Amino acid sequence: MILSVNEITIFLISISVLLFFARSFGELSRYLKQPIIIGEITAGIILGPTILGAFFPETLNKLFHESDGVNYALQGLTLLGVIMLLLVSGLEIDLSLIVRQSKTAFLISIAGIIFPFFVGFTSAYFFPKWFGIHDMEMHFIFALFVGTALSITALPVVAKTLMDLNIFKTEIGFLVIASAMFDDLLGWIIFSIILGMIGQHSSNNIGLGYLLISIFTFIVFVLIFGRKLINFIIPYLHKFTSYPGGILSFIFILGFLGAAFTEYLGIHAIFGAFIVGIAIGDSVHLREETREIIYQFVTNIFAPLFFVTIGLKVNFIEHFDFGLVTIFLLLAFLGKVVGCSLGAYWGGVGKYESLAIGFGMNSRGAMEIVLGTLALQAGLIQEKVFVALVIMALVTSISSAPIMSYFIKKGKENFGILSFLKPNNINFSNAVSKNEIITELCETISKNYNLNNEEILSKVLEREKSISTGLEKHLAIPHARINITDPIVAIAIHKNGIDWDSFDKLPAKLIILLLTPIDKPEMQLMFLSDIAKKFNDINFIGEIISSKDSKEIISKVKQL
Amino acid sequence: MIFTKIGLAITFSPNGLPLLKTAARIQNLFSSKLCLIHVGEKTDYSEIQMKKLIEKAGIPEESYQLVWQNGEPSKAIINAASENGVDLLIAGALEKETVIKYYMGSVARTLMREALCSVLIITNPSSELGSFKKFCVSVEFSSLGETAVKKSYEFAKLEKAEEFVLIKEFEVPGLAITVYDSGSTQDTQKSKLQWQHEEEEKLGIFAKELNLKGLKYYNVALFGKQGWEARNFVKNNGSDLFVVPSPPKKLKFFDKIFQHDLEFILSQLPCSLLIIRN
């Protein structure tokens, strides 16, 4: 079939309209500090039967439905979009990170899969009518699907949230990313099995055993042998082909071939693209710049097309079921937040940080919508369930950042270094030498914490002897690592100042004594760097020095 | 004393003599004891051959102890080193092995992964070896990391090294994916630079706390895959000794398939390697 001039024109106009709306609403979302996908889905709802179709049905029909040729072309384009989306999702899965993840990350990942899966599966299995399921033959597969849908975490939304909250390169950020990657990997494997089971159910052409063997053989082959081969080839591509053309073509060729192969096996094409993406992304030779180019290319052109067309297929008002949306939202929050928070808590993370991790992992974003769309296309779910899933994905994505931010702040109040400062650890000193101030502070600490004064004093003085701990702007941070489990902070204020051999030759007036556990050198480095940064303003130090009593100092320090 | 007893896994191969000379040189440098470990049957002939080899290396009879072991070479060497109180084991290795050998596990690689003491691996030992001039140390903010820096710094001072570089790698998995959701490449670049600055600052405090005096050192923070970035830096920098603290867990076969950290370095050694263990 060849497209007529008229069809080609309509096709190109349709794409332009879709991209224009996706970008405009995406930018609006960005402006409102929301995930960009919110704008793209909204653009689709406006362009689709929900809004445009209700007021200008002919325009909608003309642009997107009238011609079969245009329809096929659009379908092809969105299929490419979703395959590329999964290819780039795979690129960012770091296999070695999953393999060597800490016990805590493992607990978060596992609890973050098992708990929501259990909640989703049991609800859908025992109460199918809540979800409008009447076909009892598909009932089991549907319950598996709901379990999987609730277990998914959208890595891109999580990553952006961590970036915005400035916690990407922290212990929490690392835990969330490692767990989200693991859940993503496991979630897609389970979903590919479900998709295969639907295919098996409808055409009866393959057995479940064959399906499982195919999936696992494909995974093992690509992730072990394919990955090594790709890692071997990429340096040659960099050497002998133009950059970035050579490597980009290579990635997309392999991605599409992987997709074609899994489609042929009876599993969906996206699964092949995802697994091939992981194999490529794991290569140490793949440059960070290449990843960014691919993300820009896919997420600014193809992914928006896919997400906008979702709104074209379904009427979101007609299929909106308040009860179902509420059920999905409740199950989503209950499953993921409780599961991941408990996992983190069991892994030794603090109460507030665990909750921050739970809410961070709760964002479903793009991945949930892809999952829902495929399930809708496969006939596994009805429009009502699809709409509820999309709303759940959007609500969990929107709510993730602010709630996470709230608990992170709460955690900082309780666990930041200055939270270890107690009013009775603050001295107003008239000492005549730095050794005398240190001695006073050590006595205060040993009294308040029942520690061996001589041991602390000798450690602090020993450290002081090697290089002075006097910094700039009247600040000195004498410190030592001793046999304690939690850090200890004490402050001495010396109004006239005392010579501390500082860089700027100014006398030290604010003296912060820091004691950290002997076996945690990094904690000492972090706190030293943190204190130096927080007390970088000479006026603020002046304000602290002029405080009348310990309580005033504590309240001023808390403002930091 | 940096190391009190040096062990050398010695063979009758062409590498045997240069390795013996290196071990003797390091023994003198550290004023330590020397324990030569040979895995093979002790016969009159092999004893004479061994004696000749040691004499050729210029090692006086009273300054070494010779241990004969039987059994699977890597296990026998590790046991002998442990039984004789060796705290630095020296062995020679190829920079890169064939794929099959890498996965099967050669003697040198097994020593690197499984020895209970520190290990010094000399690459290409067939050539005449001088002193190490360019040191690179991979820094870990841990007690073992501190020990690794202190020991290698003292080693570098004894060697009168020309360069001593402290490297801190940091990895931020998933960073590129922030571009996906309305982030920009400029933002990720800005974050990377900021993190690099923070790591360099921490590295500066770390080095200052260790009170390293007598030899100028440089600090470098590297963004990227742990182990891989350091390996490349060392290679490009032309360093001749790379010092790493040993990983907390033993590396197993699984780690060879999904390589990370030290495994990247072991698969292709950038230069001679010193693995510090407690």
Image: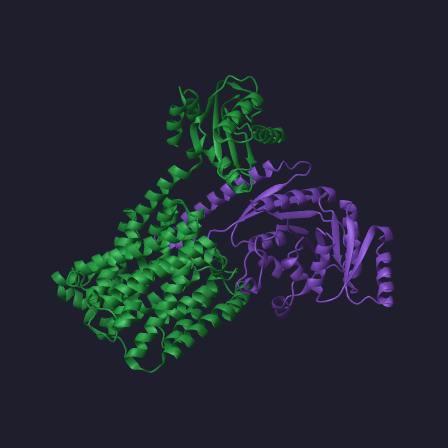
Apparent side of residue B127 relative to residue A283 in the rendered image (left or right): right
Quarter of the C terminus of chain A within the rendering: top left
Residue A367 visible within the image = no
Q: Is residue A305 above or below residue A218?
A: above
Q: Is residue B101 left or right of residue A107?
A: right
User: Residue furthest toward the left?
Assistant: A55
At 44% from the left and 54% from the top, the residue drawn is A105
Q: Could you tell me residue A296's position as x and y percent?
A: 38, 57
Q: Position of residue A108 (x, y in %)?
A: 40, 55
Q: Colour of chain A?
A: green
**Picture mark count:** 0
Q: Residue furthest bottom?
A: A205
Q: Nearer the viewer, residue A220 or B5?
A: B5
Q: Residue furthest front?
A: A450
Where, by quadrant of the figure, is residue A188 drawn? bottom left
**Colour convention of the picture:** by chain
| Point 40% across, 19% down: residue | A548
* Front-lying residue, B72 or B10: B72
Front position in the image: A335 or A245:
A335
Residue A505 location in percent, x, y? 56, 23
Q: Nearer the viewer, residue A231 or A476?
A: A476
Q: Is residue A286 visible?
A: yes
User: Residue at point 50% right, 24% down?
Assistant: A474
x then y, percent, for residue B162:
70, 43
Q: Is residue A78 rendered to the left or right of residue A469?
A: left
Q: Is residue B200 above or below residue B103?
A: above
Instruction: From the image, state the color of chain B.
Output: purple
Where does the N terminus of chain A fall, quadrant-wise? bottom left
- Tell me if B7 is positioned left or right of A172 in this view: right
